Image: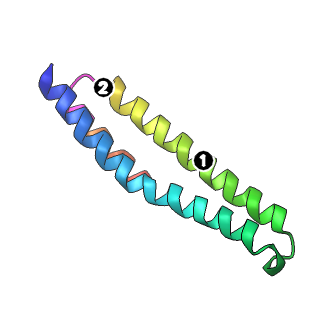
Amino acid sequence: NSVVNYARWICATILHLSISEGVVGSLERMKYSLNHSYKFFAPVRAFFITLFEFSITLMVEVCNIAIILAQTNPINIVLNFIAIAIIA
């Protein structure tokens, strides 16, 4: 159904754009921790913490997309999108 696919596309795009800021921020912090390791007491720990943040953000996006794709009713897609947007 084209209405369902259109609702999925809109919700997935908005979620992706809202989550992509977290991914970019994590990558910037990883780069900072590598380039300025002298500013950290434990630079490896700082890098791995931001790596975990990056990984968790990607997994949240994958789960959100899976939830959106599993819905078959446009109303459920929008309601789940709102719930996911509030949680994420």
Residue 34 percent coordinates (x, y): 75, 66
Q: Quadrant of residue 73?
A: top left
Is residue 35 on the magenta stretch?
no
- The part of the chain drawn in magenta is 71-77
What is the quadrant of the N terminus in the image? top left
Q: Is 23 placed left or right of 49 in the picture? A: left
Residue at (43%, 53%) from the top-left corner? Answer: 19
Residue at (45%, 60%) from the top-left corner? Answer: 21
Single out the residue that lies furthest toward the bottom: 39
Q: Quadrant of residue 44?
A: bottom right
Q: Quadrant of residue 47?
A: bottom right
Residue at (44%, 54%) from the top-left corner? Answer: 20
Residue 9 percent coordinates (x, y): 25, 36
Q: Residues within 10 Å of mark 2 (few under 14, many from 20)?
A: some
Is residue 73 on the magenta stretch?
yes
Amino acid type of the residue tagged 1 in the rendering: Ile
Between circles 1 and 2, the one closer to the viewer is 1
How far is mark 1 from mark 2, CA to CA?
23 Å
Residue at (67%, 59%) from the top-left corner? Answer: 50
Amino acid type of the residue tagged 2 in the rendering: Gln
Q: Mark 1 — residue?
A: 56
Residue 59 percent coordinates (x, y): 55, 40
The disc placed on residue 71 is 2
For mark 1, give the secondary structure.
helix
